Image: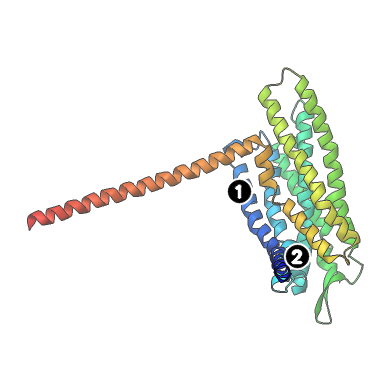
């Protein structure tokens, strides 16, 4: 009985440590995977974004997925380890941190919507539209960021203030929580997911049409199908992994704290899945990854062989000097 009790205690300790350090694991793993995704998307196959402006969205998402992990996820880790929260540290940090968290969430979600929109246009239109031009895609991304800066701008003047020598994360002028969490549920989850479903339905319809058209090259169909599968999987994961926590904070923010933390972990896990999803479903991405690894190994082998060659020459020269000295003696 005692051994069983000790085993249960050790299991609980391991689980508690995992809960504490999981946000840090997500930060390290997510930063590495998303940076690797960004690097691969900047390589030769994807370098010419004029032909496929979707790559601009994918690169930006990789950067924003890194930034998301350094928001409330980092805050949870700091609170559990050293008892500090950036939202309670000072009024300035509270304002900046709160603003950036909502802003990054919103931009990240809507970039995914615009990827689906871009794919739908590329399949449904015979000629390139204004939205499919590389320069215009960069303008759209900038405009998207500007919109969500303006939507969340009220946080700076009105949210977070000192009260009895402590930072209050609310507003003096209106009740921001859970009101803004409910707005976040609409902006970050409901509307993006609705648009993703609409555009993905159109993508599936046009893929079926493409399959019936014999004039379309087989390679073109495979490329469209590959990236479309990636989008469909990303959309499903987005809904399953991000919606529950947004609903929980919007309507149950003052209850079930442990459940909220668990749902938070699921949400942040979604933002490190870009690399594995692209790797499993996107053939060109997978090919570029293997090329990158092969190139790295080739360079490493080349450097090692150069070092070995230089060492061999050095040893031979030294040996000749020793023989020369011996003969002179």
Q: Residue, x 85% and y 56% (percent of image)? A: 246
Q: Quadrant of residue 168?
A: bottom right
Q: Residue, x 80% and y 81% (percent of image)? A: 165
* Count of numbered labels shown in the rendering: 2
Q: Is residue 31 left or right of residue 124?
A: left
Return the residue nearer the eye: 54 or 68: 68
Farthest-out residue, front: 1
Residue 249: x and y in percent read: 86, 60
Describe the colour scheme in one phrase.
rainbow
Q: Residue, x 73% and y 62% (percent of image)? A: 73
Residue 104 seen in the figure: no
Q: Which residue is mark 2?
A: 97
Labels 1, 2: front one: 1
Quadrant (top left, top right, bottom left, bottom right) of the C terminus? bottom left
Quadrant (top left, top right, bottom left, bottom right) of the N terminus? bottom right
Q: Is residue 277 left or right of residue 189?
A: left
Residue 12: x and y in percent read: 73, 66
Residue 235 seen in the figure: yes
Residue 199: x and y in percent read: 82, 37
Location of residue 55 with respect to 9 vertically, above or below:
above
Q: Quadrant of residue 163?
A: bottom right
Q: Quadrant of residue 201?
A: top right
Q: Which residue is mark 1?
A: 36
> Secondary structure under badge 2?
helix
The label on residue 232 is none
Residue 10: x and y in percent read: 69, 68
Q: Is residue 36 left or right of residue 81?
A: left
């Amino acid at each position: 009985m005692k051994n069983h009790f000790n085993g249960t205690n050790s299991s609980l300790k391991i689980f508690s440590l995992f809960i504490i350090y999981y946000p840090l694991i997500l930060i390290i793993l997510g930063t590495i995977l998303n940076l690797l995704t960004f690097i691969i998307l900047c390589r030769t196959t994807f370098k010419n974004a004029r032909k496929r402006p979707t790559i601009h969205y994918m690169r930006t998402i990789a950067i924003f997925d890194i930034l998301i992990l350094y928001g409330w996820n980092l805050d949870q880790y700091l609170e559990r380890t050293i008892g500090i929260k950036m939202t309670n540290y000072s009024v300035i940090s509270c304002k900046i941190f709160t603003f950036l968290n909502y802003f990054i969430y919103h931009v990240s979600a809507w970039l995914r919507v615009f990827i689906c929109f871009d794919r739908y246009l590329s399949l449904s239109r015979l000629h390139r539209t204004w939205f499919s031009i590389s320069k215009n895609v960069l303008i759209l991304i900038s405009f998207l960021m500007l919109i969500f800066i303006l939507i969340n701008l009220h946080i700076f003047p009105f949210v977070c203030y000192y009260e009895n020598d402590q930072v209050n994360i609310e507003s003096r002028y209106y009740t921001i929580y859970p009101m803004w969490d409910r707005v976040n549920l609409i902006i970050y989850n409901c509307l993006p997911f609705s648009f993703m479903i609409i555009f993905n339905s159109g993508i599936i319809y046009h893929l079926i049409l493409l399959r019936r058209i014999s004039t379309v090259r087989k390679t073109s169909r495979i490329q469209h199908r590959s990236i479309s599968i990636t989008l469909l999987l990303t959309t499903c994961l987005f809904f399953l992994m991000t919606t529950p926590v947004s609903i929980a904070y919007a309507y149950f923010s003052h209850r079930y704290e442990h459940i909220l933390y668990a749902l938070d972990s699921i949400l942040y896990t979604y933002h490190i899945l870009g690399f594995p999803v692209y790797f499993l479903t996107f053939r060109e991405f997978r090919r570029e990854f293997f090329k990158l690894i092969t190139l790295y190994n080739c360079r490493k082998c080349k450097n090692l062989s150069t070092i070995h060659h230089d060492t061999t020459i050095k040893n031979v020269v030294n040996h000749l000097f020793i023989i020369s000295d011996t003969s002179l003696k």
